[in-house]
Every structure is written in C-alpha cells, then in structure tokens.
Amino acid sequence: MTYLQTFIFAIIQGITELFPISSVAHGVFTPYIFHWHLDEDFLKEHFLSYVVMLHLGTALALLLFFWRDWVEMIKSIFTGNRRVLLLVIVATIPAAVIGLVLETPIRHAFSNVTSASILLIINGFFLYFGEKIRSRGNKEIDDLNFGQAVVIGLFQSLALIPGFSRSGSSMTAGFWMGLNHEASARFSMLLATPIIAGASILEVPKLIKHGTNGLLQMSLIGGLLSGIFAFISVWILMNWFKKKEINAMRPFSYYCWIVGLVILISTFL
C-alpha cells in the first residue's frame, strides 16, 4: 500500500464503517474501482491487520463521541444500576463468538467483487423493508430485555459477510425489538466499540511484530484519518436519526442499490 492508497482507503473505511452501507464490501470494492494491484504477500500476511488498525481509529472515534455513555456504564459497576452495561455485554457475545469461529471461512467465501455487490443490493432491500415492517418503536435502550439484546447481537454478526452492514443489521434488529431510531442507532454504535477493540487486540500486535517497509507507520496514519472521518460520520448519523423517525434508512437503501448494481454491471463489461 502507498500513502495515497492509505489516505483513500482510510477515508472510505471511516465513513462506511458507521453508515449502514457495509465497510467490508467497500473494502472489496476500493482496490477494484481504483485498479490497485496489491501485492499477494501483503494481502495474505498483513492486509487484515492493516484494516484492523484503521478500525481501531473508528473505535477511538466512537469512544470519544459516546464517552458519557461509557463513563456511565463504568460508574454503574459501583452504583448498582448495571442494566445498559449488561445489555451491551450480552449483545456483544454472539458477534464475538461467531467472528472468532467463522470470520475467515465466511470472508473467503464471499470476498469477491461480484458477490459483494450482489449482497450489498440485498442489504439495501434489508434496510428498506426491515424498517417498513416494524411497528413504530418507542423503547429506550434500558427497556430491552436480554433476549432482545441477543437478537440484535446475532444480527450484528451479518457484517462478517461482505455486503451486509454491521450498523444497518443491528439498527434494523433494534427497530424490530421496539427501539426508537435514535436509541437503536446509539445501541448499535455502543456495540461496535468492543467488537472493533477486540479485533484490534488480536491483530494489531501482528502488525507491530511483522510489519515491514513502513507499514506500521502507514497504518497509524490511516487509523488517525479513519478515526477523524468516523467521528464526523457518527455525528451526522446520530443527528439524522434524531430528526427522522420515518424512512430514515431509505437514502442508505438507495445508495446500496445504486452502487451495488453499477459495480455488478461493471464486472460483466
């Protein structure tokens, strides 16, 4: 990866990780669109750790944006009202377990441009109709029961498949569990932080140990840039869901359909 490629990839990663448009699919699309011929050894040995470093920037942005929520959850350990903290933990477990066991075979099976574009189109339908079929939610996060939190966590696991969005899947499941739009978006973002941080704990040491030719420094710059754009993205997203309780997912559905269809058609030309 060059520095220019890192800048482009980091900006795209920072935006698409939190918007419900599948950062994994865009990670597949970006080298294809820009005609990057990446080194096979880099892809095999270092690419996952490199991407996780960019994700780490996203996790830090989420911590900064939702710092009050995390402070309240930490304080709750000592004050006794631990419900939101326990809901986050319970909802994180399914994605953590499934990710550890199935991430590699799932991504290898679906991580090509054609399948990612088809699945992105399907993600668009999921967002569009998933929001339409739910009843108008009025619950806040602490109104959820633990079974509902597990369901949201299971849907978050769809993000292991390139084309499905982690935030889109978990937010849509939140709608179905009765959360209002803002609460569903907030819960989705809170769930993202431990998942991304956990992946970083596993992968970043590999990059530090084996990174060569300035890859670590490049990854750090990419992580910083990704974090900046992730912070901007989550600010836009949370304000959007505060204002929109109807058809909030519609623009993202249109985006998934258009981008997925354009890239799918291009693979046959």
Image: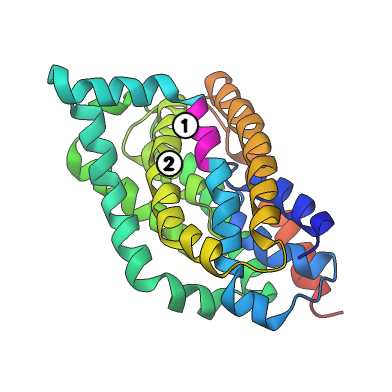
The residues tagged by marks 1 and 2 sit, at their Cα atoms, a distance apart of: 7 Å
Magenta includes 70?
A: no
- The location of residue 5, given as percent across then percent down, is 80, 59
Nearer the observer, 34 or 136: 34
Residue 22 shows up from this direction: no
Q: What's the residue type where badge 2 is placed?
A: Thr
N-terminal-most mark, 1 or 2: 1
Q: Which residue lies under the disc numbered 2? A: 193
Q: Number of numbered discs present?
A: 2
Residue 56, can we see it? yes
Q: Is residue 86 left or right of residue 71?
A: left
Task: Measuring from the top left, give residue 47's x and y in whole percent.
Answer: 61, 68
User: For the point 44% across and 43% down, which residue is it?
Assistant: 192
Span colored in magenta: 59-64
Q: Mark number for residue 262?
A: none
Identify the residue position indicated by label 1 in the image: 63
Left or right for 63, reference 54: left
Look at the numbered disc 1 and give the secondary structure of its residue. helix
The quarter of the picture where residue 214 lies is bottom right
- The residue positioned 66% from the left and 81% from the top of the image is 41
Quarter of the figure with residue 170: top left
